[in-house]
Amino acid sequence: MKYVDEFRDPARARALASEIAGLVPRIARTRERPLQIMEVCGGHTHAIFRYGIQQLLPDAVEFVHGPGCPVCVLPMGRVDDCVALALQPQVIFTTFGDAMRVPGSRLSLLKAKAEGADVRMVYSPLDALAIARDNPAREVVFFGLGFETTMPSTAMTLIAAKKQGLRNFSLFCNHITIIPTIKAILDSPDLHLDGFLGPGHVSMVIGTRPYRFIAEHYKRPIAIAGFEPLDVLQALWMVLKQLAENRCEVENQYGRIVPAEGNRQALAAIAEVFELREYFEWRGLGSIDHSGVRLRASYADYDAERKFCIPNLKIADPKSCQCGEVLKGVLKPHQCKVFGSACTPETPIGSLMVSSEGACAAYYNYGRIARSQVVDTTGLRAAVKVGA
Amino acid sequence: MNDAAERPAPPARLRDTRINLSHGSGGKAMRDLIADVFVGSFDNPLLAALEDQALLPLGPLAAAGDRLAFTTDSYVVHPLFFPGGDIGKLAVAGTVNDLAVCGARPLFLSCAVVLEEGLPVDVLRRVAASMQSTARAAGVQIVTGDTKVVERGAADKMFINTAGIGIVPAGIQIAARNAQPGDAILINGNLGDHGAAILIARNELALEAAIPSDCTPLYDLVQTMLAVCPDIHCLRDATRGGVATVLNEFAQASGTCMRITETALPLRNEVRGACEILGLDPLYLANEGKLVAVVPRQHADAVLAAMRAHRDGANAAMIGEVCAGPAGSVIMRTGFGGERIVDMLVGEQLPRIC
């Protein structure tokens, strides 16, 4: 298939993998410990596992799976807020599909639906707007979720709602912003990251400049990456090449989509509708300053937080859950105490196990070959050494 | 209550244009509905007797094999009509296929319908006609049935349950536990056409693509395969949960590992494109006319050739092989050159945010 197969060519993958293997000995610190490269975005985590990219790499290069899955970093209290909104009889609660299964302290949205809540899965916030038009007697709430990738479509929807004068549509805003979060990770003391793969679709909106502080202040290389497996490998190669040459720069592997200045129209829509919150709570990472957005006063009529009484309780993450350490890259998913035993995709404790972009779910679904390699060496070790 | 409880008056064409509660009440309205729509469509003497049960002579059944195969399935689909099929075709083909994949010759079906008040009678007529034409093509008769009507909102237009019986000839032993290391894994054509057709027919995605459902009875294809290789080890139709689920069932029941190759999976470009856009995996999409077969390696080429020569297997392919371990798992070599586990699906496949 055109525009797909070109980016999944195994011969090119092998060539890139061997170039990466050639770079590793030139990076001095690999003699002491493996290099840790964080892919910030959940889409990259998904691609790494789906295509078995880690298996093509030398042992001295490890991916650390970052916080860039918006579903995964949603604190339990916010899910409870969603459920409370959805259970109000006049409300039609609309959401992207991923968020349906995320556990709250009592219910997920999927279970709330079974208890009678009118929860509807939509593919775009504009679908939610159409539901509001078709149901003038009901209150339609859209669960706005995601980084700068999904923010513009929410913003455009609100602009449209205001223009149309719709009174029964509102946004429960949980949009978050990536830069303060990367900064918080870089400031955390228990971290040893050597470089970053930058998020592709976020950068399509915000451009490449906001990442400069990573290279200039924190002295870490970063390459913004696309989501096909060759994109990920090439971006990794770019980061390792910087390390080998003692450079720290913002490079853009995903130039076919990401312009340096971002998307002006999308940024204008975001600026029209949203403003930064003082702080926002993240699952596993705690409260991060200026990491979330809310609606501006000029859009107050469309703000579900002002329109409805929302419990807004802070619920501590389950004690057994180590999502935070996994999100910061301190632990690998399978090193969490409850991974694969109490916490599985069927019975997720932490949200990293829920979304297919969550590091734990990806590790569980696609990655068990590598893990069983440790315990089961009968014929399996040979089997996993493919393409290398 | 059985529909056959009352003798019908001479068949009169039903005058009502919509189903109402009296069509399920056991009275005259129900009798007319059954006589006109069902007996008229299904047209066979076993049903036309309109007793409380169909009486099936044992002699010919016993002569045809040494085991009776018996299965049931309920059909709920939205929309009722979609490219390549409808709920009626699905209700016959699905149950026929559940019988066919154990090597049975499907013979008789029941048909129980739950109708929502307000359903246009013409819709029911079209569904019944589709059931009959599928049954005729599959060589089965619909010999008993039941009709219930529920109030508007208590069901989504119509639900159908069909149960079926068939005869398994002596000597045929097909079971998921029979997979052995070295066996070849075959499929009779493109993955996911039904799932993709339904997704697009629902029109929630504003995607346009001409993908017809693969809904079809597979009895004839299975017989063609058995004629070449009576020793087929495993056979299952890959419906809900898709090919991935069937492979996991084989691996777990037989304690083996199913190793498949991504580049060998037959896939329509349109289905692949829809999956790429929505972040879905075609291995988990539903099929209604696809079977996965595990056959001894030495017969694999002959079975594959026979499948390809059949109208329901033109795009058949060998997608992998059975290995010893890790027991109970399915592993796919990706087109990219890595490997990954293909697990059972938890819940529904949900499109990804971004």
Image (cartoon, rainbow, N blue to C red):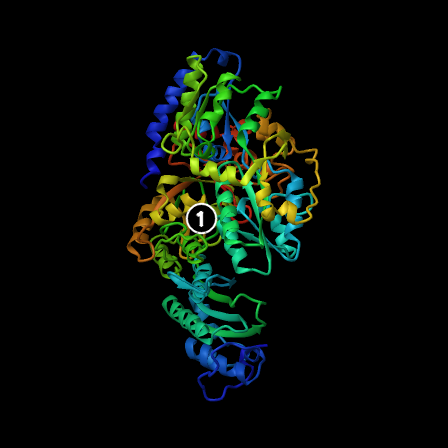
Q: Which residue is at 52% across, 57% downward?
A: A133
Q: Is residue B188 above or below residue B121?
A: above
Q: Is residue B93 above or below residue B55?
A: above
Count of number-bearing discs: 1
Depth order, front residue of B214/A328 = A328
Tag 1: residue type? Val
Give the residue at the far front of this rendering.
A298
Q: Which residue is at 35% across, 49% downward?
A: B270
Q: Which residue is at 37% across, 46% downward?
A: B273
Choose top left, top right, bottom left or bottom right for residue A264.
Answer: top left
Please provide percent x and percent y for residue A130: 50, 55
Please provide percent x and percent y for residue B209: 36, 53
The residue beneath circle 1 is B243
Left or right relative to A211: residue A22: left
Q: Is residue B65 visible?
A: no
Please provide percent x and percent y for residue A185: 58, 24
Left or right relative to B228: residue B177: right
Q: Is residue B220 visible?
A: yes
Please provide percent x and percent y for residue A349: 64, 39
Depth order, front residue of A266/B276 = A266
Please report, as a chain letter, where disc 1 is located. Answer: B
Q: Is residue A323 above or below residue A29?
A: below
Q: Secondary structure at mark 1?
A: helix
State the quadrant of the N terminus of chain B.
Answer: bottom right
Depth order, front residue of B129/B296 = B129
Label 1: how many Cα within 10 Å (few below 14, some 14–19, many 20+): many
